[in-house]
Amino acid sequence: MTAQTIAQVGAPPVIAFDQVSKRYRGGRLALDDITLALPAGGSLGLVGESGSGKTTCVRLALGLERPTAGRLTFNGAAYPSGRSGLRPLRRQIGFVLQDPYDSLDARMTVRDIVAEPLRIHRLPGGRGRRGDELVAELLGAVGLPGADLRSYPSRYSGGGRQRIAIARALIAAPTVLVCDEPTSSLDVSVQSQIINLLLDARRERDLSMLFVSHDLDLIGRVADTVAVMYGGRVLEIGPADLIRRSPRHPYTRALHEAVPADHPRHRRLADRNAAGGQYGSGSPQAPATDARDSCVFADRCPRAQDRCRVERPPVIAEDSLRSYACFFPLSDGLTGQQRG
Amino acid sequence: MTREGSGGSSLTASTTGLAGEPPRGPALEISGLNVRYGSVRAVVDASLKVEAGQVVALIGETGSGKTSLALGAARLLPRSAAVSGLVTIAGRDVSGMSAIEFRAIRAQLVGCIAQDAMAALNPVVPVGRQVGEVFAVHAGMDRRQAAEAAVAALAQVEIRRPDAVARLYPHQLSGGMRQRVMIAMAIALSPPLIVADEPTTALDVSTQAEILGLVGDLRARMRSGILWITHDMGVVAELADWAAVMYAGQIVETGQVEQIFDAPAHPYTLGLLQTRRDLRSGPVGAPLFQIRGSPPAPGEEPAGCPFRPRCPRATQVCADVNPALEPVGTTAGWPGAGHRAACHHSGTWS
């Protein structure tokens, strides 16, 4: 597929989705023929709303689920099956998940939480004094110097807990960092601090990063390449700058336009005479039945024509940089009005 | 500043218990409000006004006291909270009422929109009946009238096929639809005041856009004043006429929303605006603008200005004296009407 060739230009991918589909029991198609690659040392952002399939991608990348169809590889080799087979692979992947209130075990001390990957992977420092030193070092690196190793997560704010989660993600010296909405439950002023911490960690430790968010602005700041997902498909993929400044897929533009204004003089959403609203109706959920022979966005799309409802738009490479799945893409002049 | 609704309410229920009463004052007027949980002061000496037809954004982060302020004003806090100060809603002194007195008229005075509609709605009762209950209990309608009023109320919030939706249970609706049902209940009796606690925070961005559009429309048609709690400056820009920024339990800046965005007078407000602007337009991979440090922990009350440890402009006076909320009179280009900030250096910010 073309998207594959595009995404794989340069370094060989660490994680590659090659025409991957995932169907859950009960028949829901969560991922529908996804081709994506996280290049070594690069960062790939997945952006989409609930039901878009981005979290399923994370679960596959972490080896928590297996694809129903297609090929999923880590450093070129298929994901092994079974717990023990996956263990060496999982050691390579640190992860930071959305809710720091859920993802840290309230009954474990900070020391045990941060050192957990060492224990799981039977690395030195899982227990004992040597581990204490390593844990303290990591806590210092994430901005919690001098934290009491015997304290519990309840002592920390949301931002503090996410720092602990990042320390845990980094302690086994992974090569890949997977972040699933790591700041969506945090305050604005804390979000920047956590993102900067992740960007620093990525640079200092030379990590590849898979970053998932519903926030187009945020993803455009942290990921080199951004894939826009909807209804289990990738609708557009390209460099973050192009996705932000000149989207091709009408859904990407709709996402841009749904972001509130920067200034009360530019308000659009709460004043429907101004603009917007054209994308408003319809549900962002993945369709209940498979829309194999149509565009998943057709029902909400202001540019949709008959063809979009009877034929699935293939992923087309515009140039070496980006591709999109749309019969009637936007051109550079049609990039929405809110920026500038 | 205030938006006048077009000739009263075109909403379904004109049968509020307050109909026919003399012209009322501001939707909400709070003066010297304090909320305390044991030894923790959650809101300190806050004063705020919401005019009829106006949307006032109450901006703050976790622990800033914004929810305590709003719920304290609506007398919705648990008994463990000690609330003092003067609160009038539509000209009625509700802070002086007994709990029983207030409960009898609360639904007529205040509508509430919660962040988590799933938790706020009853999971085992169809949503139409939940909306209808408001009419049955507070507007004296019989069952059939209430059911009809409920369907009309669902139509008001732009739910398509409201008669069918009325029969569904909350879990059968999307998050955006549930939030619409909450809004329908909040505006059912056309109360003078609506308190909205981050109603779009948990929603997808395109669903949030729809809800903002809906509220924008309703605002133009209603006379209710809306107190809208949020941490999102974008939502403030879209919706608010007036804004109040809270930090560590205090209102640190308040003014017309254009004043706040054009000439923020408190460094915390400026930091919130810079954070958002930088997020939206900074280069890929570059560090994000951040407000350093973190807010004081609950119960921690440092001397002087509570923002001082995080403030790039702090001087000795900031460590010694907690600045009062004072007019920002001389901001260039603005008459300064009503714009106030609690900062020793607010004059140097424009």
Image (tube, grey):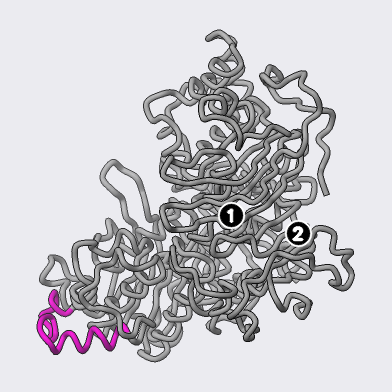
Q: Residues within 10 Å of mark 1 (few under 14, many from 20)?
A: many
Instruction: Identify the residue under disc 2.
Output: B255
Q: Quadrant of residue B343?
A: bottom right
Give percent across and percent down for residue B142: 56, 8
Magenta stretch encompasses residue A124: yes
B340 over A258 or under it: above or below? below
Residue segment shown in magenta: A118-139
Q: Residue at x 78, y 70 (%)?
A: B263
Give me the disc on residue B230: 1
Q: Nearer the viewer, residue B4 or B329?
A: B329
Give percent across and percent down for residue B14: 71, 19
Question: Pointer 1 indicates a residue of which chain?
Answer: B
The answer to whether residue B301 shows anywhere in this view is yes
**Circle 1/circle 2 CB separation < 8 Å:** no
The answer to whether residue A89 shows anywhere in this view is no
Q: Quadrant of residue B59?
A: bottom right
B129 over A199 or under it: above or below? above
Q: Nearer the viewer, residue B320 or B193?
A: B320
